[in-house]
Image (cartoon, rainbow, N blue to C red):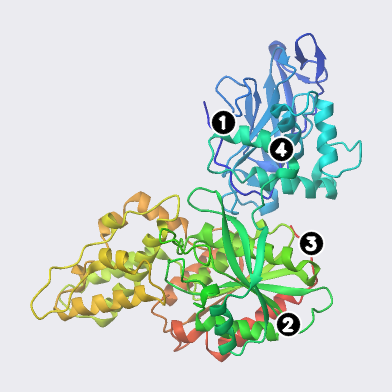
Amino acid sequence: MHPLPTPYLLPGLLGLALLSACGGGGGGANPAAGSNAGSGGQHILVGQVIDGYLEGATVCLDLDHSGTCDAGEPSTSTGPDGRYALPMAGTIPKDAHLLVEVSPTARDSDHGGLTLAEAGYQGYTLAAHIERPTHITPLSTMVVGKLKSGSVRTLAQAEEATIRELGLPAGTDLGQNPIDHPQLRAKARRIARQLQGDAHLTATERWIRVSGRLSDHANFAPLFGDVRHSSSLPPAAAAQLAMAGTPAQGQLLTYTMPRTRDGQAMDATALLLTPVQSPPAGGWPLVVLASDSTSVAGACAASLGHMDAMSLQWVHQILAYNMVVVIADLEGRGPNSLDATQSHPWLHLRSSGRAMVLAALASRQHLGPRLSGNWAALGQGQAGHAALAAAQFSGLATDMHYKGAVALAPHSGFMARFNKVLSAAGQARYGHTYDVYLALAQIGSVVTAMVQGSAATDTPLDAAALLRAGLPDAPRMPPVLGLREIHDRTRPLCEDALPRWVSEDVKNYAFRNFGPVDYPGLQPQVLAEPAVAAYFNANEPGTVKLPGRTLLLQGQSDTTVHPASTEMLLERMQRLGSEVSLLRYGGLNHRDLGADPQARADGLGFLATLLAGPVQPGR
């Protein structure tokens, strides 16, 4: 058996066009009637798989009703424009259905050539009854679900029930290509988002769940990005904004997003701040940002009063531009994530991108027509990485129009930076080079935070293997804890405790007059292992062509995000065809960049230009 791929969020839809008609007779359907005949009595069903048009999906005839494309069942793959040709022979049972398995490696034409995984989606399954094979879509899947659940007896009854529950006109042809019919496309997209919400289930469990769920559309669970509830600003966040003199009206939104560890729905939170001015004609534009932090604990959230100074300053001025701001707490942070077992997947591209984009979608749902639909992303450091992730996964906000991002010194170039610093430490074995020690502290903080955050993902890193233990205590010498113990001690702490602890530890180590190479930080041989390197490489931003326009800002004296890393990021993004530019600021370090008047004026001017354009329909 070939199990179904793990289902993720997908903005798409499949349609399977059977351009060869099927006739009925006896105990089954006869594919000879109207189909393309091949040699030896073989017949070929041809058509398309659609949402955008999906390339690389598997189409099969599910003869045993298992919900999987099994060995021995006729199957084929979709090509460009979602087209397929499925060879078949013999008599087909009347109750058979066509199945489409869409893996995360399939490509949707709606996403500019990206795979589903690259666009932030997961795989899922669609179906169509053998007598209605023209297009396999979420609509046809809902029809099959009703039949499989036993809530109706005939195909006609299943179609009538689906039409009625979706509020469509009587007699609507559910087999049409939904791309050509806006009302059907909107209905199909919403159903598709439900089908993509079962990543934690096995193939069999998922098909049972889909069948039952689609038999009663009214009982659908909340969709990712749906607002579960809203409330007044938490006191700590309100006090922080008031102290910064930020005039705004705000609420805390709780919305749903997929948990990175297993794909199950979880609550995420964001601060939604609206200007005191009335919306302009056409509605407010929206800026989505996150707060820059190295903390993974659930309590270290912007909504709980842990907004960094850069974010506060930028929020104040964005609101003055009469734009709405939503500050995403990101996965694993916020009032709903205070359990000690919760943690935030720090610098995890998929997690951060989804949290940012779905916060935009939740804002749109909450404010409705008061938002124009145009939006952009903003952030520095970790949040700059999240802004680029939001660009990559912006297609999740199907009803909005993504315009671009401003990323200040975004974290990137992980493996290249790690290896360069470790090599420099090896060459400085007998010298006390301040720059090498400083670099050791910086990469130690980044790696330790990523290892801490990986515990909340589907590919956790082994802290005991990757991080070294400290040195034995020595008389009249400060302790050297090592990254492994710092990893454990700083997990529940906020206010960027981790980099302070690592810096102090490196300083204590240098005080003992040892060479940099022997600091108990990373295990180089473990860092080089394929699975470990793959984790860091998978979370690199800008590895696909990004939509919209991107502005990178970089301080040339930054030791947290080295300028060389941002130059490499710029080169990669340009090579892949992204529309990106870089502004460099001499003498500015990481902390000063976000507060610099010129850098802020450049970033705000870029955002204002992006978002002042005409409102365009969502993708």
What amino acid does circle 2 point to?
Answer: Asn
Tell me if mark 2 has few (under 14), some (14-19) or many (20+) residues whose alpha carbon lies within 10 angstroms of its own.
some
Q: Which mark is residue 204?
A: 1
Label 4 sits on what residue type? Leu
Q: Amino acid at mark 3?
A: Pro
Tell me the CA gap for discs 4 and 3: 28 Å
The numbered disc on residue 617 is 3
Q: Secondary structure at mark 3?
A: loop
Residue behind mark 4: 214
Disc 1 from disc 2: Cα separation:
50 Å
Please state the horizontal and vertical placement of residue 310, each as a whole percent of the image: 53, 82
Q: Which of the two marks, 4 or 3, is nearer to us in this view?
A: 4
**Disc on res. 437:** none
What type is the residue that disc 1 sits on?
Answer: Thr
Distance from disc 3 to disc 2, alpha carbons, whole Å, reads 21 Å
- What distance separates the C-alpha of mark 1 from that of mark 4? 15 Å
Tell me where residue 492 appears, x and y as whole percent: 38, 67
User: Which x, y percent locates residue 440?
Assistant: 29, 73
Q: Are marks 2 and 4 in contact (CB under 8 Å)?
A: no
Indicate which disc, 1 or 4, sits on the residue closer to the N terminus: 1
Q: Is residue 121 above or below residue 67?
A: below
Q: Which residue is mark 2?
A: 322
Q: Between residues 547 and 509, which one lies in front from this camera angle?
A: 509
Whichever of labels 3 and 1 marks the residue nearer the N terminus, that label is 1
Q: Earlier in the sequence, mark 4 or mark 3?
A: 4
> 468 and 153: which one is in front?
153
Q: Residue at x 62, y 40 (%)?
A: 124
Pinpoint residue 39: horizontal percent, then vertical percent. 70, 14
